[in-house]
Amino acid sequence: MEWEKKHLADCRKEIKENIERLETQLAEVTAESEELFRAVRLGANELYSQLVVSVDIKEGCQVSLRKNRTAYEKPYFGRIDYEGVETGKKEQLYIGKNGIMLSGHRMLVVDWRAPVASVYYENELGRGSYGTVDGSEIPIELSLKRTFDIADGRLLGYYDSDVAANDVLLVKYLSQNKEAVLGDIISTIQKEQNQIIRETPYASLIVQGVAGSGKTTVAMHRISYILYNYKEKFAPEEFCIIAGSEMLLHYITASLPELEVSNVKQLRMERFFVRILEQEWKKSYRFIRTGAGESGKSKLCFIKALEEYLQKIRESVFPLEDIGDDKDGVFMSGESIRETLERSGEKSIAALVTYLNERLRGRIKMLLAEEEQKELRARKIKEYKNWFVWKKGRKLSDIYIEFLLDYLRGNPEELWIETVLEHVQKGRFDIYDMAALTLIYVRVSAKEKNTDFRQIIVDEAQDFGAAVYYVLRQALPDCYFTIMGDVSQNINFETGMNEWDTLAEGVFAAAKVRFHVLAKSYRNTIEISQYAGRVLSAASAGNYKIEPVIRHGKPVQLWKQEVLPEGGGDTFRQMGDKALSLIGDIQKSGYETIAVICRNEAQAELAAGLLGVTAGAAGEEDFKKGVMVLPVEQTKGLEFDAVILWEPSASNYQETAADAKLLYVAITRALHELHLIYSGELSKLL
Ligand SMILES: Nc1ncnc2c1ncn2[C@@H]1O[C@H](COP(=O)(O)OP(=O)(O)OP(=O)(O)O)[C@@H](O)[C@H]1O
């Protein structure tokens, strides 16, 4: 202990010196760049490149200073001692949230994202290896793995152990209250989480993780990891985080600056489609949250039927016939058209029309190249100009309508199509109509393929059906996807994902996607997890079980309100009073985020009225401290110190898989305390 205390003190001394040196350097470089800026503004253009360099140095200084200042309080959390098997070189590395360099390029603290830091998270003592960014494996003999508990620059203790080195700290960390943002877990990342964070960025991932298993947290750390290790290959602007609601996006991305991630994009799924559709999404169009026939439209067979329909249009625009005439010969053969079509699967019809017309013109010029053919050449070029035609400006929605009519002819029993047609004619589109429009855009009119994005991260991915992912893949063929979800929490039972095979096989081709499972739940106490377990088997057909991290809390409390003869109003008032007194008690025990979770918006309005707070409305963006009254659907992905589940009665939650999923979501939002207030009969699921 004394040795480590001294090491910490020495380390902090060096960091302090670093800070002082950087402060001086920053002051100097700031003065220098200001001077250069003035000179350039007065016309000394030859100093411009010097100014750019100076500004770069200044920014570098600011970043280092920030890292050193943060590190001063808690420079590191782990230590590994090992010997390189091939080199025989002994290393003793301290691992922290920020890599700290000393002058002379001596590494004081290794950044948690560095490849070697993986040893701390994954390896057991003895022979092992770690992977580098270029894919090679470095064999090592690990002799020590140590976890530190450091606060405010003081060493409180350390633990040496094998693979689960960070368990003690983990439980300590989990017992704390939560800030109203997603925490950073750098010092307690678990092995199976680490494997996902450090998966190659050149693969798509599907992660099935039970509620509270860290899917969202892991996804954010993965972005940080990729940007740190693959700076040259991926830029932050090429990342987009997609989720179902604004509140969830705000909640999850609030943790990004802490992880040194800035400038990544974040969009709700429907906004993402709008972004891809660009001007094809007309001003008069409206997104509707619930459309018609979503159950049918969300399935792969529907979107693949559209794909086939578009393929037929393509075939009709480019007949595989020779182009030319008997007298002057063949300018372009049917065979060469076929080859071009095959090679250009990613090109839209409009792009191909332009391309093939240009090629045809080029071929005519080449075949009639002689001077004496000049006149004939000009005539033929004119004759075959715009040989391939596609009506520009044809509205995507018209093509969609034609397809729907065609689909209806083939499937006359699918009556919902009539309603979809009505919506589309009025310019009203749900998420699956938007996916369909996007596919039509990609196949029909896109000028070129979209290269804006390279990494897409979808959170709460189970809420969208396979058709959405099929279209995303087609629209962004060069993109890698990180898809995080939990089929047990699929609240859109008819449309969303109830298993992952369809996605893995039907959208990605199973060989191309890596599947991970996170089974441990870090959020809830054992008592809450076990309670959730009761509904889980009904919610996931028993496929994915929760393994809670051993952390005890209060038992789950049930508060039954007898139905009063005076009628519902009085009964609810009594329930409201009970909730208010519970909230008072919970706040007294120091918890800050409390949610009252209701079955739907109407019940949330009612409960909010009784509690004297405003209910979280659909468009609400802020996740805040205090009491929030929310319909269960809007609590997806969020977590609260305490949850009061409002009216989990038999009539609100019936014995169906869909209702079980809703209950499961609601219960698993609670970190420390769960209370149920209900009148009459409790749901049979409980
Ligand atoms: N390794 C870990 N160490 C400490 N805390 C962790 C760890 N992994 C997850 N957590 C915590 O567990 C909680 C749940 O994490 P997160 O919200 O990422 O889970 P999730 O799988 O996305 O949950 P849900 O499916 O319910 O939205 C968070 O408070 C997070 O900080």
Image: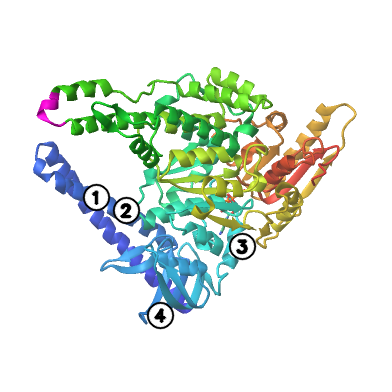
Question: Between marks 2 and 3, how big is the CA–CA gap?
Answer: 37 Å
Element class at badge 3? helix
The answer to whether marks 4 and 1 mark residues whose Cβ atoms lie closer than 8 Å is no
Along the polypeptide, which appears first: circle 3 or circle 4?
Answer: 4
Question: Between marks 3 and 4, how big is the CA–CA gap?
Answer: 34 Å
Along the polypeptide, which appears first: circle 2 or circle 4?
Answer: 4
Question: Between marks 2 and 1, how big is the CA–CA gap?
Answer: 17 Å
- Can residue 616 be seen in this snapshot? no
The magenta segment:
369-374
Residue 232 tag number: 2
Along the polypeptide, which appears first: circle 1 or circle 3?
Answer: 1
Element class at badge 4? loop
The correct choice, above or below, for 585 with respect to 357 in the image is: below
Residue 405 tag number: none
How far across and down, in percent of the image, does residue 573 sit? 79, 31
How far across and down, in percent of the image, does residue 229 sit? 37, 58
The image quarter containing residue 336 is top left
Residue 171 tag number: 3
- Can residue 330 be seen in this snapshot? yes
Outermost residue, front side: 326
How far across and down, in percent of the image, does residue 147 sit? 51, 70
Residue 56 tag number: 1
Label 2 amino acid?
Glu
How far across and down, in percent of the image, does residue 288 sit? 57, 26
Along the polypeptide, which appears first: circle 2 or circle 3?
Answer: 3
Horizontal arrangement in the rendering, residue 266 relative to residue 604 (left or right): left
Label 3 amino acid?
Val
Along the polypeptide, which appears first: circle 4 or circle 1?
Answer: 1
The residue that disc 4 covers is 85
